[in-house]
Image (cartoon, helix red, strand yellow):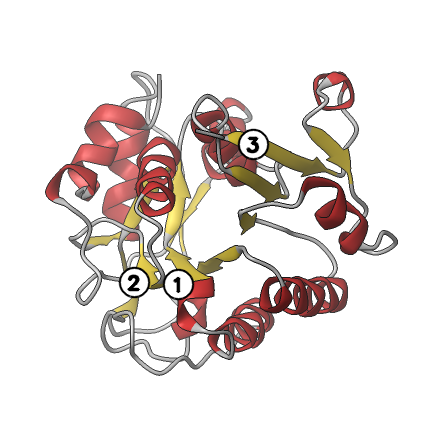
Amino acid sequence: MEKKKILILGASGFIGNAIYKELCNYFNTYGTYFTARKSFEKNKQFFSYNLEEDDIFEILEAVKPDYIISALRGNFTAQVIAHQHLVEYVLHNTCKLYFISSANVFDAYSKYPSYEYDKTLSESIYGRLKIKIENMLLRLPKEKMAILRLPMVFGNASPRIREMKNHILNNEPVEVFPNLVINVTHDSKLTQQIHYLISKNKSGVFHLGSNDLVHHEEFIQEILKRVGNFSPLFKRVYTTNEERYLAVLPKENQLPKNYQTSYEEIINDHVIA
């Protein structure tokens, strides 16, 4: 049986590359890169793609994917145009689009966590971009798309962890938000979940974060305890005097138990090697 073809847009980024590494042994997996690295240039499965200059149709025609996973980053206007083209392609071809979205589509609602079918509303430019692209996908037939909303993503290679390590090494304070209540995920758990969704050909809206909540400050302090035996400096940022939620919890579309996670599991098993 021929392997399914998967095209990951943004496969040179942290999340896109983690997805590529998870899927490439099981599917015929292709990716795009923007930042030139020898490993990408030599890999025949990778295409150079400049979001602002290149036409995504050329890569789509070359690969003819069964699944497209969009983990694109970059210029917001160019992202919108690229996703308009993706939606048009998916509509007229036998394939499905998985869009990596964000908890920020709910960042205007600070009083409670958000579930899959809650109304989106954002105060941030980033959140509004994600909503705009989500709305494009929601106009597709349901079986042709999945929206994957992520909370904060951690992992050894994650930009967040690298930034914290640099602050500590340079004796600079690490920013924490004491009143912010979040859920979280880790790149290895996230990529397993996406692998499951593709293998089961799932559609719809999925919240791929821990099933429980934690204060941002508490979570960051617990992570940094794993780094080494020293006292990091913290800069506490209070955006409000009340508790503020930025969390995407699964309710309608729960994954099987072995694909679920808790914030403690992410701290204990994964974050810093």
Q: Helix or strand or loop: what does disc 3 sit on?
A: strand
Residue with the mark numbered 1: 103
- Which mark is nearer the camera, 2 or 3? 3
Mark number, residue 29: 3
- Which is more toward the observer, 12 or 163? 12
Q: Residue flagged by tag 1: what amino acid is it?
A: Ala
The residues bearing labels 2 and 3 have C-alpha atoms spaced at a distance of: 28 Å
Name of the residue lying farthest toward the front:
1
In three-dimensional space, the C-alpha distance between marks 1 and 2, rounded to whole angstroms, equals 6 Å
Residue placed furthest toward the left: 257
Local secondary structure at mark 2? loop
Q: Residue furthest right?
A: 53
> Residue at 40% across / 57% down in the picture?
148
Residue at horizontal 83 percent and vertical 55 percent from the top: 55
Q: Quadrant of residue 227?
A: top left
Disc 3 to disc 1, how far (Cα)?
Answer: 27 Å
Task: Tell which circle, 2 or 3, labels the residue nearer the N-terminal end.
Answer: 3
Q: Going from the N terminus, do you reach mark 3 or mark 1 first? A: 3
**Residue at 47% across / 76% down in the picture?**
138
**In the rendering, which numbered label is found on residue 248?**
2
Q: Nearer the viewer, residue 180 or 258?
A: 258
Q: Amino acid at mark 3?
A: Thr
